[in-house]
């Protein structure tokens, strides 16, 4: 074989290997992006739940100092995510923004009572916990009323459950499709080498001996494909963050290293397992079956 023929064959092998790695990396990118969104689905749901405001309205005789004492007691409860005192002056300022600067002219005294703005932890945003918490807070002598958007809580819980279910189904479908695409890519690569595999089997090579080199190649193929997919995923998330930075105020980026590692592991496992299965199936084929 001349040096020119060697160069041509080497170039074709490299081109085939590179195209396979790129194809697999694109599939792994989809898996990684879907995984990042799925992991943050719970974080997004918790963000919206913890944004619901509960207004604890005090009796008109309660002072700011008394409200601070109640706030201090409630802040020790496990269900409290955030709590703050809304003074009469602050309440008047907010009402002026809503009703206009002259709304107090019809009153002889300031009708706005001191209140608390309470945000519960996401785990406590359901009807059972809320009713229990409202009953507990309602027993405080200084508290006159507690208000919140009850319909919003119901709609939020219902819709979030549906969204989580949809994301699980979509994620499972993407995983199945991705597995099939990677398996087909590996199958095409192995199919091109079926005569080499058959020749090795004819001279007495065992399945393990034949599978070993292909599995090693698949390992590095999955590893490099995972690295490329990780780079693409990081660049994509960075572009989204620069353009829509508000999303990353909701998303928890601490999970990103686990997603990136999971993409590489998934690439290696899918490539190696697919390769082992396909190679072992090729070993058992008859000579005539190689041409079909």
Image (cartoon, rainbow, N blue to C red):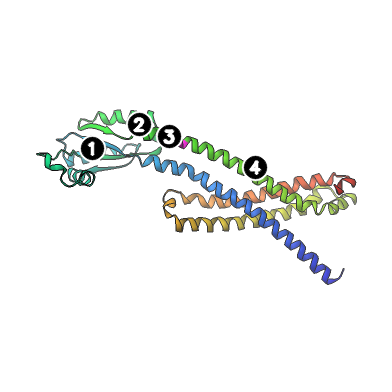
Q: CA distance from mark 4 to mark 1?
A: 54 Å
* Residue nearest the observer in this picture, 133 or 205: 133
Label 1 or label 3, whichever comes before in sequence order = 1
Residue at the (70%, 56%) spot, across then down = 20
| Cβ atoms under marks 2 and 4 closer than 8 Å | no
Label 4 or label 1, whichever comes before in sequence order = 1
The residue tagged with tag 4: helix, strand or loop? helix
The mark found on residue 144 in the picture is none
The mark lying in front, picked from 3 and 2, is 3
The residue where tag 1 is placed is 70
Which span is picked out in magenta? Answer: 156-160
The residue tagged with tag 1: helix, strand or loop? helix
Q: Residues within 10 Å of mark 2 (few under 14, many from 20)?
A: some
Question: Residue lying farthest left?
Answer: 108
Residue at the (27%, 31%) spot, across then down = 137
The residue where tag 2 is placed is 130
| Cβ atoms under marks 4 and 1 closer than 8 Å | no
The residue where tag 4 is placed is 176
Q: CA distance from mark 1 to mark 3?
A: 29 Å
Label 2 or label 4, whichever comes before in sequence order = 2
Image quadrant assignment for residue 89: top left
* Residue nearest the observer in this picture, 111 or 212: 111
- Asked whether, in this view, residue 17 is left or right of residue 50, the answer is right
The mark lying in front, picked from 4 and 1, is 4
């Amino acid at each position: 074989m001349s040096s020119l023929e060697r160069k041509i064959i080497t170039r074709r092998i490299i081109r085939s290997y590179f195209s396979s790695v790129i194809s697999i990396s694109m599939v792994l990118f989809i898996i990684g992006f879907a995984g990042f969104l799925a992991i943050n689905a719970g974080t997004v749901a918790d963000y919206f739940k913890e944004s619901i405001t509960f207004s604890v309205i005090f009796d008109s005789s309660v002072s700011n100092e008394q409200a601070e004492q109640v706030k201090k007691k409630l802040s020790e409860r496990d269900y409290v995510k955030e709590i703050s005192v809304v003074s009469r002056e602050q309440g008047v300022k907010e009402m002026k923004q809503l009703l206009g600067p002259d709304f107090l002219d019809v009153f002889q005294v300031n009708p706005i009572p001191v209140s608390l703005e309470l945000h519960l932890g996401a785990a406590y945003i359901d009807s059972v916990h809320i009713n229990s918490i409202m009953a507990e807070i309602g027993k405080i002598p200084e508290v006159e009323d507690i208000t919140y958007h009850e319909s919003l809580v119901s709609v939020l819980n219902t819709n979030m459950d549906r969204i989580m279910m949809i994301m699980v189904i979509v994620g499972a479908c993407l995983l199945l499709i991705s597995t099939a695409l990677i398996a087909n890519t590996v199958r095409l690569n192995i199919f091109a080498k079926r005569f080499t595999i058959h020749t090795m089997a004819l001279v007495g090579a065992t399945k393990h001996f034949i599978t070993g080199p292909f599995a090693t190649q698949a390992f590095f193929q999955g590893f490099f494909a995972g690295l490329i997919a990780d780079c693409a995923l990081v660049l994509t998330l960075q572009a989204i963050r620069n353009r829509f930075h508000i999303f990353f105020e909701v998303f928890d980026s601490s999970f990103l290293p686990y997603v990136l590692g999971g993409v590489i592991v998934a690439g290696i496992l899918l490539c190696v397992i697919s390769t082992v299965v396909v190679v072992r199936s090729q070993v058992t084929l008859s000579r005539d079956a190689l041409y079909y």
